Amino acid sequence: MGSFRSFVFLLALYLLQGSNTSLVQLDNNGYEGIIIAIDPAVPEDETLIEQIKVMVTAASTYLFEATEKRFFFRNVSILIPENWKNITQYKRPKHESYKHVDVLVSPPTLPGRDEPYTKQFTVCEEKGEYIHFTPDFVLGKKQNEFGPSGRLFVHEWAHLRWGVFDEYNDDEPFYSAKSKKIEATRCSTGITGINRVYKCQGNSCVTNRCKIDSKTKLYQKDCQFFPDKYQTEKTSIMFMQGIDSVTEFCNEKNHNHEAPSLQNKKCNFRSTWEVISNSEDFRNTEVMVAPPPPPVISLLKISERTVCLVLDKSGSMADFNRLNRMNQAAKHFLLQTVENGSWVGMVHFDSSAYIESNLIQIISSNERTKLLESLPAVASGGTSICSGIKLGFQVIRNAYPQLDGSEIVLLTDGEDSSSNTCIDEVKQSGAIIHFIALGLNADQAVIEMSNVTGGKHFYASDEAQNNGLIDAFAALASGNTDASQQSLQLESKGLKLNSNGWMNGTVIIDSTVGKDTFFLITWNQQLPVISLLDPTGKSVGNFTVDSASKMAYLSIPGTTKVGVWTYSLQAKANPETLTITVNSRAANSSVSPITLNAKMNKDTNSFPSPMIVYAEILQGYIPILGANVTAFIESSTGKTEALELLDNGAGADSFKNDGVYSRYFTTYKENGRYSLKVRAHGGENAVVRNLRHPLNRAAYIPGWVVDGNIKGNPPRPESDENTRTNLESFTRTASGGAFVVTNVPNLPSLTDVFPPSQITDLEATSDEDEISLTWTAPGDDFDVGKVRKYIIRISGSILDLRDNFDNALHVNTTDLLPSEANSKETFTFKPGNISEENATHIFIAIQSVDKSNLTSKVSNIAQAALFVPQDYIPDEIHPDPNPDKNPPKSGLSIAILVVLVVGAVIIVSLIISITICVLSRKRNSSRPRTGF
C-alpha cells in the first residue's frame, strides 16, 4: 500500500505540469508517441502488458471505423515500472516519462472505483490531461459494467484528444422531453431500454417502477436506465460504446439536442462528430483507402535518473549578481531537490566548455557536498551554448553508451547566434533538455530544444526578491523517481528591505509532509539576523552559513514537528534583498501528501488574446476544495501581477469543485517571457477533500434488458455525492514554468479590447408562471470588474436561440443591476407568450455588455419545462435485431404479465359469480314460498 500511495503522489506532481505535456503527434492519419504507463503499485504481471496490447490493437480498428476511416494508432509505448524485473525486450525510454503520460494504468483512486475516466478541466475542443484505467479494467474483469476495453479506450481518447464530453450526465440522468415524457439522458434517442428501480439483497433482486420526485418532476434518484442488450442503433460512442451495435459518434442529423448531457452543456449543443470534424486533426487528414497497419508497440522500462548541469559562466553572468544567484539555486538543487540514487555531473561554458565533474551517484550527503565544490567562482568570456550541451552529452556518454532518457539542465543569460546549429543533434540524441532562462537576453532558440525533447522551460528575472532561480531549480525533481524522495516546496518568498527592516512570516508543516525539511535563507549583501521558532515556540538554530554564496540553510533530519513554524529575518544592510525557501518530503510513504501544481493554458500567446492560469491541489487523486490560491505572474523586467484563482465553475474555471483553480490573465505588461508561481494556503476547517466520483467517468451499465427481463451487474460502489472530509491547514508553492507573449503595445491601449467572459453556469427553475435564474457574474474584462448590463432572451427552440440570439424574445431587465465579477446573480421573470407553437419548454440565454459596449459570448442555454411529465409512461418497445438467433420468450415485462394474469382472474371470478347468482334466482322462483 505504501508504494501505491507514494507513486500516486509522484503522478500527482507531474500530471498537470506544462501547458501541453503530451508527446502525441499525428502523421499520415496515424497517432504516434502515445505513452501508456503502468504504475509501480501494480504487481508485476506480464498478462497486463499483453492485455494492453490487445486493448490498443482493438481500439485502433474501432477508432478507424468510428472516424470514417480517418484515424488509427500507429505506435504506442508502454512504460514498465523500475521495480519490475528486467527483460531483454525492454528498452530504455528517451523522452517518455510519467510527466508525459497519456494513459495511466494504476489501482483505483478509492477502493472499488474501477471506472475509467479522463482528466479534463478545459473547455470544449481543448485536449484533456490523461486517461486513467485500473488493472482490473484492462484485464477484462469489468467488461459487463463498462464494455470491451478497446471500445472504451476510443471513448476516452475522444475526451483526451478532441475535447468532447459525455452524452450522459450522472447528475441529470433524466429530463422532460418535448414528447411530455421523461427520457434517459442519452444520444441518440434510438438507444432503447427501460427505466426501473432495481435493488438486490443477496441473491434476491426486486424490480420496481420509477417514481416521480415532487420537486424535480423527474424520476427519483434510485431510478436507472437499463439498455436493451440487443440493439440496431449505431450511435453514440460517447453515450454507451459497450452496446454491440454502437460504432459511430452522434452527428448533426441524429444528435439529441434536448438532453442535459455534458456534451450539450459544454459544446453549445453541437454533436460530438461536429466537434471532432472541426479539430485540427480532422482538417489535416484525408479519408484512407486501404486499412491501417496494426499498432507498433514498444516496451520501455524506467531506469535510474541521469542529469548533467550545464551552467553559463560567461562575462554577463557577473551582472546583477547572476553568478552568485545561480550558485545559490544550484546548491539548493544539489542539497535538497535531486533524489538519492541519481547520477549527477556538471559542465561550465563560456566561449568554450569544461567538464567540472563526471557523473557521481548520489548516495549520501558526501556526494552532494563534493558536487557543490564544482560550481563556478568567476564569470568571464563569451557564450557558446552548443559547446556546453555537447560536452554535457559527453559527460553522460562517459558512463552510458546511450543518451536515451538522460537530462541536461541548461542555464544561460545570453544569446548565442550559433545555438541553432546543434538543434538537430539535440533532437536525435534521445536526451531531455530543461532550459532555465536568466535575464532579458537569454537565448530564445533554446526554447525549441526544450519543447522537442519534452523538457521544461523556466524564466527568472534579475529581481532576486521574486526567487525565480531557486523556484526553477526546485521544480526539476525527477519525473520517474519514487515519490517518497520527492521534494515539495512549502514556501518561497522574498523582500527588498532597508537596514534593520524585518521580513516575518509563517510556514505550516502539515502531517502529510515533514521528512527531511530544508530551510534556505539568501541575502544580497550581509548575513541577516535569523530567528526560527518551531510550533512549540522553541528557537531552532544551527543554520549552516555559506558566506561565499551568501546563503544559510538548515536541514532537519527525520520527521519534524507538525504545526506552524515562525520565522523572522532582520536585514543588516541598506538596501538588502532577503529570500526564504522551505521544502519538505512526504512524512509517510503510505499517506499521500497534499500537492500543488500550476500551468498556463499555452506556452506562447499574442496580445490581446487572454490566457488562463490553472492550479490543481490534490491529495493523491482526491481534489482539495476551499483553499486560498494566488498566482504571481512576473514579466521579463520583474513586474509582478497577483491574481486570485477560483474553483467556482465560472469564467475560466470549467468545473466547480474539481480541485482545479483557474482565472483569466490579461494584464500584460510588456513583450517577452513571463514566469508563473502559485501559492496555496488552506486554513483549518476551511478546506476539505472532495470524495465525489471523478468527472468524465465512463458510463456504468447497471444491467441489460434481455427478453424483457433485467440482468443486473454488480452495483457500482458509490460514496455520498456530498461527502467531504475536513483537512488540516497547509501551505504550498509551485512554479508553473515560463511562457512568451508578443504584440503587446508599447504604450497602454486606450481602447478596451477585453469583453466580459461568457456565463457558463446559468440555471433555471420554474414555479407556476415564474422562472428563476441564477448565474455567476462576469466582469468588465473577462472575470474582473463589473459589467454594465445583461441581455436576457428566451425561445421555444434551443437551436433558434443558439443560432439567432439577437432575434429571440427579449426579457425586460431594467431592474437587474449587475454585481461585481464572481458574485452570485439571481433574477425572476414571467415569460409571457413565446412565438413557437406547441412549445413544451422555454430556453433562456444571457449576454453581458461592458462599459465600452463590448459583448460577451452568449451564455450556456438553460431550460424550464412548461408541463408536468406524466406519472405513468408505457414501456418502450424493445426491438430485437436478432430474432432468429435470440428468439424472445416474451415481449412483455414480468410486471405487465402479473397485471394481466391478475386482471384475467378477477374477470373470470366475476363471470362465475354472476352466473351462479343468476342460476340461484331461477331455482328460487319455482319453489313454493313458506312463511312463519
Image (spheres, rainbow, N blue to C red):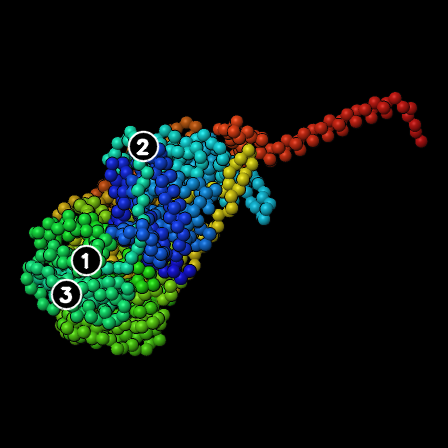
Circle 1: element type: helix
Residue behind mark 3? 356
Extreme residue in the front direction: 88
- 417 or 503: nearer the eye? 417
Q: Which mark is residue 71?
A: none
Percent position (x, y) of residue 132?
37, 49
Residue depicted at x 76% and y 29%: 913
Q: Element type at marker 3?
A: strand
Tell me the SS state at disc 2. loop
Residue nearest the viewer, comparing 348 with 192: 348
| Residue type pointed to by label 1 | Arg
Tell me what residue is drawn at x 52 percent, y 29 percent.
Answer: 885
Say if 266 sits above or below 908 in the image.
below
Mark 3, Cα crowd under 10 Å, few <14 / some 14-19 / many 20+, is: some
Residue at 58% x, 44% y: name it: 205
Proximity of marks 2 and 1: CB atoms separated by less than 8 Å: no
Give the amino acid type for the residue marked by disc 2 in the picture. Pro
The percent position of residue 477, horizontal first and vertical second, equals 26, 60
Earlier sequence position, callout 2 versus callout 1: 2
Real-space CA distance between mark 2 and mark 1, rounded to the nearest whole angstrom: 42 Å
Sequence order check: which comes first, mark 1 or mark 3? Answer: 3
Question: Picture quarter containing residue 160?
Answer: top left
In the picture, measured across the screen, residue 773 lies left or right of residue 18, that is right
Q: Position of residue 313 (x, y in %)?
A: 11, 63
- Sequence-wise, which precedes: disc 3 or disc 2? 2
Given the current orientation, which residue lies at the most extreme left position? 381
Report whether 155 appears left or right of 430.
right
Q: Residue 397, which numbered label?
A: 1
Q: Which mark is residue 291?
A: 2
